Image: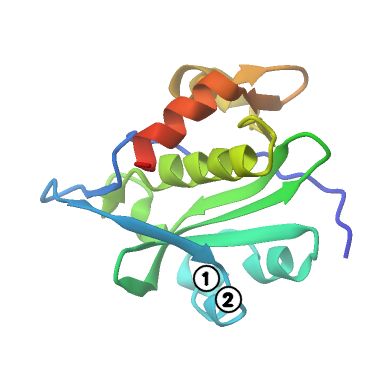
Amino acid sequence: MNRKEHFHLDFIVDQLTNSIRNVVSGDSFQTEISRFTKADCKTTLKKNGWNFDWKAELDDDMNEVYKLTIAGNINIIQGVLSIRREKDHIFMNLLENAPFNIGKNKQYEGVAGNLVAYACKISFQAGFEGFLAFTAKTKLIKYYEENLGAIHFGSQRMLIQTHSAKLLVEKYFKT
């Protein structure tokens, strides 16, 4: 399946944390990012509060789909990311926080930032110097410029360049 449709992303980077942080206790938890699987599709359904069809993302052979979990607890998905490798950058198709990590009653903050940093890390590993592009909802363009160091380069396209990507990767992934 070769889908040409691009979603306009509307994730909120609530905090740039070293991992993810429990909103109530303030405790930080180390995270793991691993491949999202068909078995994961059973828990990321619209009836469970998820907004996107993650099975469709997984079924597209051009996409790489990842899940964020707390280290040692791979059964509870905190967020999901879909990317694709382009000629000279990574394109972020979708990013979604788990339903329990959205809004004023969310359990954990830092999920979206963690996933964006991971996409930047993959860009560096692929030899793309951290370049990460995505399509943003209009109302969030300024927000992504201020919070991720992204630049707006026409229509609703955003780009995270090397310097900003490096800062994100260093924040989340200690080497």
Q: Amino acid at mark 1?
A: Thr
Foreground residue among 140 and 151 = 151
Q: Residue at x 86, y 55 (%)?
A: 3
Q: Is residue 12 left or right of residue 27?
A: right
Q: Give the residue number, with chain letter if any, for mark 1.
A: 44
Vertical order, 14 against 1 (above or below):
above
Foreground residue among 36 and 135 = 36
Asked whether disc 2 touches disc 1, contact meaning CB atoms under 8 Å apart, the reply is yes
What is the number of the mark on residue 41? 2
Distance, label 2 to label 1, CA atoms, is: 5 Å
Q: Residue at x 78, y 34 (%)?
A: 88
Q: Which element type, helix, strand or loop, lies under badge 2?
A: helix
Sort mark 1 into few (<14), some (14-19) or many (20+) by Cα contacts within 10 Å.
many
* Residue 41 pos. (x, y %): 58, 76
Q: Is residue 130 left or right of residue 87?
A: left
* Residue 107 pos. (x, y %): 26, 55
Q: Is residue 54 left or right of residue 1?
A: left
In this view, the residue farthest toward the left is: 25
* Residue 129 pos. (x, y %): 64, 29
Foreground residue among 118 and 144 = 118
Q: Residue at x 38, y 42 (%)?
A: 175
Vertical order, 12 against 105 (above or below):
above
Q: Amino acid at mark 2?
A: Cys
Whether residue 63 is visible to the viewer of this picture, yes or no, is yes
